[in-house]
Image (tube, rainbow, N blue to C red):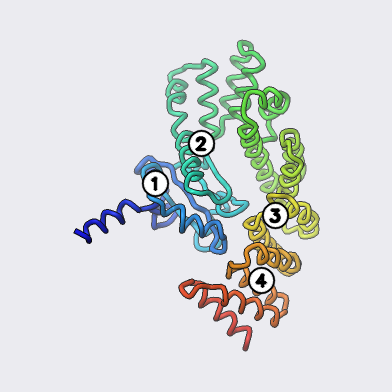
């Protein structure tokens, strides 16, 4: 009886079941089961990632919801398939929680750690985004071109990561005379996915109406996504004026000065890192790290890794500064001291490196899988 009860308890406490296989295999499974994919994009050094893995993904309520609604997939963005996956779906911080259709279209994303309640809310929103378009899509395919149906259909397309621009422009050309100005901007707001578009210009012109009609959070979520899409395009085509356009338009909507600076400096950092332009990259580091977003410990870790990977030796001094601050912010995280030791080693400061790796070893639990790596590095430094 005791064994049976124990088995029942274990079943009840089952958390998220993550798919064990490649990304392509996960896509095939999603197609076969007609489900979207929940992706936990993490890094091995990320504290919030570890906390979610240990304390959130393991909860029964979370597992019941996510196992029934999604194919669940974890990917270390710095190992294995991670770098290639990151080319398709870039991340700015860890963890990044993505929701991706079987057609490989990202339709929802949350950046940063969440508790169980927050994760369930995010998952529920993703479900509604993914499935909420079906009613409007059916009516649209049947030829219904009433304003409510078209707006709902376009919104669903945009939310599922598909382009709604062609349909929106065609509708405005054909039906525009029968729409009032507010309805036109509603169509534009539903369909605009890039800041460098005519539809987004309509959104800009009627921003007061949008703030009065929608919540500030909803407007900023839409605008931020569109501006990031234009920054991505600027990076892809190495076109600085597109980045400047995205920043200028973001400034028209962001009400907080800190948000503006974070978006502007963060966008320039992404651009200059992609194109290996250290002098320009460095100009934006201090403004960015002084913002709320830039001072977040997870974001500082991402920056420290990004700059060393992109620039090598020119970035070592900045990386040292960041890892020192990270160690002060998370003094019990062994991996932070290991990363600082690695930077000292790259700089040729072997005594400082040995001191920091000893601190990492002191802080690492006996069952920490990284402990052997720390000890091996310490032995290398002592040779």
| Residue at screen point 42% across, 50% down | 72
Circle 3 residues within 10 Å: few <14, some 14–19, many ≥20: some
Q: Position of residue 314 (x, y in %)?
A: 76, 67
Residue indicated by mark 2: 160
Which sits earlier in the primary sequence, circle 1 or circle 3? 1
Which sits earlier in the primary sequence, circle 3 or circle 4? 3
Looking at the rendered image, the disc whose residue lies closer to the viewer, 2 or 4, is 4
Q: CA distance from mark 1 to mark 4?
A: 38 Å
Q: CA distance from mark 1 to mark 2?
A: 26 Å
- Disc 2, SS: loop
In the rendered image, the quadrant that contains the N terminus is bottom left
Residue indicated by mark 1: 61
Q: Position of residue 114 (x, y in %)?
A: 53, 49
Please say if the residues under marks 2 and 3 sit with CB atoms less than 8 Å apart: no
Residue indicated by mark 4: 340
Please say if the residues under marks 3 and 4 sit with CB atoms less than 8 Å apart: no
């Amino acid at each position: 009886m005791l064994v049976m009860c124990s088995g029942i308890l274990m079943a009840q406490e089952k958390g998220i079941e993550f798919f064990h296989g490649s990304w392509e295999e996960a896509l095939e499974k999603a197609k076969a089961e007609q489900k979207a994919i929940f992706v936990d994009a993490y890094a091995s050094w990320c504290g919030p990632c570890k906390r979610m893995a240990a304390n959130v993904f393991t909860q029964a309520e979370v597992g019941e919801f996510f196992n029934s609604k999604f194919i669940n997939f974890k990917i270390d963005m710095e190992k294995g398939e991670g770098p290639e996956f990151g080319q398709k779906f870039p991340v700015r911080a860890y963890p990044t929680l993505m929701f991706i259709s079987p057609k490989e279209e990202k339709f929802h994303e949350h950046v940063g750690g969440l508790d169980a309640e927050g994760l369930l809310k995010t998952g529920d929103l993703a479900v509604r985004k993914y499935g909420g378009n079906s009613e409007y899509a059916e009516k649209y395919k049947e030829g219904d071109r009433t304003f409510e149906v078209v707006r709902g259909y376009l919104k669903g397309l945009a939310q599922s990561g598909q382009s709604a621009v062609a349909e929106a422009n065609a509708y405005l050309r054909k039906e525009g005379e029968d729409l009032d100005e507010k309805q036109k901007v509603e169509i534009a707001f539903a369909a605009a996915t890039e800041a460098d578009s005519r539809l987004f210009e309509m959104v800009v012109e009627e921003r007061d109406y949008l703030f009065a009609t929608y919540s500030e959070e909803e407007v900023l979520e839409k605008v931020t996504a569109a501006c990031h899409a234009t920054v991505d395009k600027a990076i892809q085509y190495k076109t600085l004026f597109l980045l400047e356009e995205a920043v200028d338009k973001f400034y028209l909507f962001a009400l907080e000065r800190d948000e503006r600076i974070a978006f502007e400096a963060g966008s320039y950092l992404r651009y200059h890192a992609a194109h290996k332009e250290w002098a320009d990259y460095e100009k934006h580091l201090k403004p960015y790290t002084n913002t709320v977003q830039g001072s977040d410990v997870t974001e500082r870790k991402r920056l420290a890794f990004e700059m060393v990977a992109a620039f090598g030796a020119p970035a070592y001094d900045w990386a040292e500064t960041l890892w020192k601050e990270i160690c002060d912010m998370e003094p019990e995280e062994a991996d932070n001291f290991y990363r600082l030791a690695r930077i000292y080693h790259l700089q040729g400061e072997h005594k400082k490196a040995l001191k920091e790796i000893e601190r990492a070893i002191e802080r690492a639990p006996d069952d920490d899988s990284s402990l052997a790596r720390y000890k091996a590095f310490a032995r290398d430094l002592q040779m």
